Image (cartoon, helix red, strand yellow):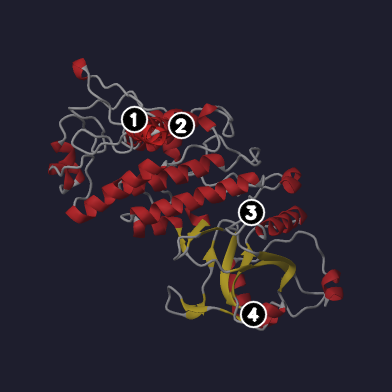
């Protein structure tokens, strides 16, 4: 069989259409000679037209079919809609080696002569295919829609997403097209990244990239030239910020989510100063959400999408433990009291009214997500580097979730005071305990000494 395959011209040829692919898949035993596929079968499903047939799942560069292998393996077969040349083959081989080391990538096999237009012969045209393990799960946008009121689930996914991004960065690789359609979340809240057409690894850097990612997830100035280990930073920030903002209040999602995005769109990146979503997020009471929103907004204004300036610091800050606990407590309180959302612990007229009515009921701001308050000024913000010290989080009508509660001074101007770090508190407590022990024990020591002299 290898001899016959070598006789076939390896020149680049125009790939089949989806209609032609459908015919090949339905008659797979005549067109797929790989044993695991030929001895297995494509998964037949009920299509939108009511037919029982293999269902194609189309992407930008390929169409995929679910397959059950010869030993009942759950597989997916990816068929290219674009021309595939030697550089693409080299890219897939390199990514395949990387995918074996990273559990959130899908294992796959690139097969140069995977599909034959006729029974294998010198007259047949052959096309490359990719055989991959079938990643089970829900696309990220659908997952968020289904779990938007589950703070714990969203925070777990956000955390695992960032762990995966950092793991790739440590390995000096990048996905290249992070977006909702390429991220799957399974029932255990584990994630998988799929679609590696824009993947970067050092060995394939000379090949360059033929794409520049989804416009609703990437810097507006990113082009094919911006290809390297840093290219995931912007889209990772967009995704992480979208998830944790929804975890804090799902109405961010209800208000800004669109079919082909999470809560940000390309228009927000091109016009960050006039973007409603940026204004809302930068007024949020969670310190990290405000800081990340500011970072993303400033990053959008830069010409270099891979800039290493302060606004593009990597890795960017994540929610710290106190904020996570506050988010969970706030959401538990809402669920128990039936409150949809409130920026205060006490329910108000805004808690059950529609967004439009809540806007009218808020006298201090026309924006329903505004953090302005009659009794507290939220500025100045606590800077992220100051988080090493311990702050006191106070719940009440004047508290700020995830942010230190400032003591009030004359003129009602808030001043942030750091409480004593835990190590200093522990040391001070130990010294006081030692002094107390000495004071209590010395009379007994004197009595014992006098008794011994007698």
State the SS at label 1. Answer: helix
The alpha-carbon separation of the residues under discs 1 and 2 comes to 55 Å
The x, y position of residue 297, in whole percent, is: 44, 31
Residue at numbered disc 4: 28
Please report the residue visible at 48 percent of the width from the left and 41 percent of the height from the top. Answer: 237
Query: Mark 3, mark 2: which one is toward the viewer?
Result: 2
Crowd around label 3: few <14 · some 14–19 · many ≥20 (10 Å): many
- The residue at which mark 3 appears reads as 197
Query: Foreground mark, 3 or 1?
Result: 1
Q: Nearer the viewer's eye, disc 4 or disc 1?
A: 1
Question: Which mark sits nearer the N-terminus, 4 or 2?
Answer: 4
The residue identified by callout 1 is 439
- Mark 2 is surrounded, within 10 Å at the Cα level, by few (under 14), some (14 to 19) or many (20 or more) other residues, namely some
- Measured in 3D between alpha carbons, the distance from the residue under mark 4 to the one under mark 1, in whole angstroms, is 90 Å
Instruction: Identify the disc placed on residue 295.
Output: 2
Identify which residue, 409 or 287, lies in the foreground: 409
Q: Position of residue 91 (x, y in %)?
A: 72, 54
């Amino acid at each position: 069989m290898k001899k016959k395959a070598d006789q076939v011209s390896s020149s680049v040829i125009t790939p089949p259409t989806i209609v032609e692919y459908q015919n090949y898949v339905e008659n797979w035993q005549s067109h797929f000679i790989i044993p695991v596929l030929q001895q297995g079968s494509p998964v037949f499903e009920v299509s939108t037209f009511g037919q029982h047939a293999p269902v194609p799942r189309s992407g930008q560069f390929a169409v995929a079919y679910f397959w059950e292998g010869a030993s009942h393996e759950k597989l997916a077969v990816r068929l290219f809609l674009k021309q595939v040349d030697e550089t693409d083959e080299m890219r897939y081989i390199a990514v395949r080696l990387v995918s074996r080391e990273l559990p959130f990538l899908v294992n796959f096999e690139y097969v140069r002569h995977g599909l034959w237009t006729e029974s294998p012969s010198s007259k047949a045209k052959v096309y490359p295919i990719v055989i991959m393990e079938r990643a089970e799960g829900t696309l990220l946008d659908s997952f968020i829609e289904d779990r938007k009121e589950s703070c714990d689930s969203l925070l777990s996914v956000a955390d695992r997403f960032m762990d995966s991004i950092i793991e790739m960065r440590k390995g000096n690789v990048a996905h290249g097209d992070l977006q909702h359609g390429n991220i799957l979340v399974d029932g255990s809240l584990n994630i998988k990244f799929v679609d590696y057409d824009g993947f970067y690894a050092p060995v394939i850097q000379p090949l360059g990239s033929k794409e520049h990612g989804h416009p609703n997830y990437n810097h507006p100035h990113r082009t094919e030239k911006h290809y390297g280990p840093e290219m995931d930073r912007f889209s990772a920030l967009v995704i992480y910020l979208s998830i944790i903002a929804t975890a804090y209040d799902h109405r961010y999602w209800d208000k800004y989510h669109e079919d082909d995005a999470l809560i940000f769109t390309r228009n927000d990146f091109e016009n960050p100063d006039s973007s409603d979503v940026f204004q809302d997020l930068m007024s949020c009471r969670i310190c990290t959400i405000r800081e990340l929103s500011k970072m993303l907004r400033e990053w959008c204004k830069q010409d270099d999408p891979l800039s290493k300036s302060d606004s593009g610091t990597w890795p960017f800050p994540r929610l710290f433990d106190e904020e996570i606990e506050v988010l969970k407590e706030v959401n538990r309180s809402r669920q128990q009291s039936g409150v949809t959302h409130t920026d205060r612990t006490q329910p108000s007229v805004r808690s059950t009214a529609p967004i439009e009515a809540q806007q009218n009921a808020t006298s201090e701001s026309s924006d329903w997500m505004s953090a302005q308050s009659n009794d507290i000024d939220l500025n100045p913000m606590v800077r992220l580097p100051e988080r090493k010290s311990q702050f006191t989080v106070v719940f009440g009508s004047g508290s700020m979730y995830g942010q230190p509660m400032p003591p009030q001074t004359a003129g009602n101007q808030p001043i942030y005071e750091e409480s004593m770090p835990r190590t200093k508190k522990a040391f001070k407590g130990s010294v006081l305990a030692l002094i107390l022990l000495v004071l209590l024990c010395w009379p007994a020591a004197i009595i014992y000494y006098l008794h011994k002299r007698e």
